[in-house]
Image (cartoon, helix red, strand yellow):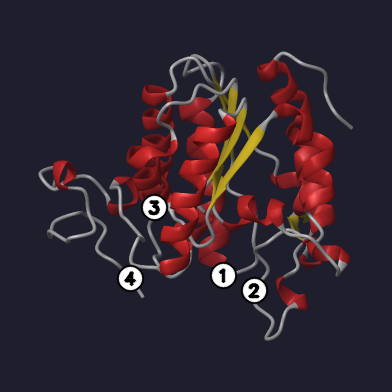
Amino acid sequence: MRFPRRALLAAPMIAAPFLAAASTPLAAVPISRMQLGWWKARHEAKLAELRARRPDLIFLGDSITQNWEKIGPPAWQNFAPTWLRLYGGRNPVNLGFSGDATSHLLWRIINGELDGISPRAAVILIGANNLGRLHWSPEDSIAGIAAVVAETRRRLPRTKLLLLGVLPSIRSDWATAATLTINAGLARRFGADAVPGAVYQDVGSVFLRGGKADPGQFYDGLITPPEPPLHPTALAQERMALAYEPTLAALLGDRART
């Protein structure tokens, strides 16, 4: 299903201040999912957790980030032990929401999830769902990710940002090509200290074999019914985390975990 590339029509779930910008792609427009009971409950629970924890480290993303909360068995979905080992002593909060595209994360950012906190670092991994049923173009997706970074920087001016590239998947030739285009665009836009306090890193090589995404690095084929490979297994996600750990440790000013 294709959605209009441009925000030309008013919709109740789109923030009013953005409706005037007809050239703004939907990927960069805050869109709520509060009509979904679980999403609303998670958003409200995370607001309470943020107030109570005042985190030093936050993770902004979609289901790949939310998966850090999963506990096995089976082993391929036992993510929590790695989370506890790498981040347990860093006062983290997981702000990953399954199914979120850039627009939904942007809505959460401007609706309280970054209010009243000042973490030392934030890890941003978003964009995979832009390439699913939404089928937003690479250019629009780059604009959406850039909007997330800009709004995060605006609200958390002292927080160091680690922006990760969109991870490889095996969904379609178009999605594979779009992922490469997005990451190349992000490298140009955010590489080489282009944005003060923000670092871009592509950790996609963790999931490749022979230059192509390795199905064995994703758990989607193990669920019933099987789905196209998109979500890293717990072991693959651990390798991903270890790939960016030196960068994250430098941003936090602490020692790298192993």
Q: Which residue is mark 1?
A: 172
Q: CA distance from mark 2 to mark 4?
A: 19 Å
Q: Is residue 232 left or right of residue 41?
A: right
Q: Which residue is mark 3?
A: 104
Q: Which residue is mark 2?
A: 228
Q: Nearer the viewer, mark 2 or mark 3?
A: 3
Q: Residue at x 18, y 43 (%)?
A: 18
Label 1: which secondary element: loop
Q: Is residue 141 left or right of residue 80?
A: left
Q: Quadrant of the N terminus?
A: bottom left
Q: Is residue 96 left or right of residue 106?
A: right
Q: Nearer the viewer, residue 198 or 191?
A: 198
- Identify the amino acid type marked 1: Ser
Asked whether the beta carbons under mark 1 and mark 4 sit within 8 Å of each other, the answer is no
- Identify the amino acid type marked 4: Arg
**In the rendering, at what x and y percent does residue 137 appear?**
38, 55
Asked whether the beta carbons under mark 1 and mark 3 sit within 8 Å of each other, the answer is no
